Amino acid sequence: MGTGKGKNIAGRNYGKIRRLRGIEVLMESLRESDLYGPVRDYLEGLGYEVKGEVRDCDITALRDGELIVVELKRGFTLELVYQAMDRQRIADGVYVAVPLPRRGYLSPRIPEMTSLCRRLELGLIFVGFTSTGIGQVDVAVHPKEASAPRRDRKRRLAVIREHEGRTGSANTGGVTRKKILTAYKEQALWVARLLRERGPMRAEDVKKAGGPPNTGVILGRNALGWFDREPDQGGRRYLYRPNQKALDALAEYGELL
């Protein structure tokens, strides 16, 4: 994703602020999660692997070891700036994404927003929607790798591991008070679904049937309390089956799998 000014991305030069034409923004009706799709599509178009709601980050994007974080908000607020500055401790670049103001680039707040983001070494993305509901993004400012914050390597690694542990983009960035699927829970659901479909099995057989690499750990530790076990015929290994808690979780998170 680049951090320098005037870098050409997706065939457009974003070194200077451009106005999105034909955009209608209804600030009152937009939710943070509405911003997720256009920003995700933009980043994926640049070759990033994009996930939502990873370790409190609205959007994480990985490409060749580079970690980009995007925080979504319905408005440009002090809370958003605080969140973005905190994410600078773990990411190579941090963007804030907000709806394009009603007056577009004629809004008197635009120069203030862009100036503040440049001073804080943050990126700024405006999201607009056409009258037919098609989302468009305009990158007004690209971030720089923040020089002031001390790197939190442990937290950065946790975010990357969580991101890489997801098999898809099940979570939508910017959601609140909704079910969030962590990498561990997603893998446990994967195991539970295999056991539900194929019946009691040993851990190694679950893994051979397509279970995640850490199948043995998930079943052995049973941290979520989803699995019951009993000795197999030889008495040396255990057969596992999903209990009612696991079946309830499969029903609850089914649309996210």
Image: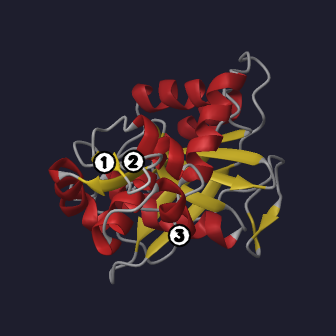
Three-letter amino acid code at the position of disc 3: Gly
Compared with 218, 115 (above or below) is above
**Residue 210: which disc?**
3
Q: Where's residue 48, x and y in %?
A: 68, 62
Check disc 3: other Cα within 10 Å, few if <14, some if 14-19, many if 20+.
Answer: few
Visible in this render: residue 123?
A: no
- Decide which of 191, 157 is in the foreground and name it: 191
Compared across the picture, whether 217 is left or right of 246 comes to right
Look at mark 1 in the image and give the residue it sits on. 230
Q: Mark 2 points at which residue?
A: 185
Residue 218: percent from left, percent from top: 45, 44
What amino acid is found at the position of numbered circle 2 in the picture?
Lys
Q: Quadrant of the N terminus?
A: bottom right
Residue 121 drawn at (x, y percent): 71, 32
- Indicate the quadrant containing the C terminus: top left, top right, bottom left or bottom right: bottom left
Counting residues from the start of the chain, the first of labels 1 and 2 encountered is: 2
N-term-proximal mark, 3 vs 2: 2
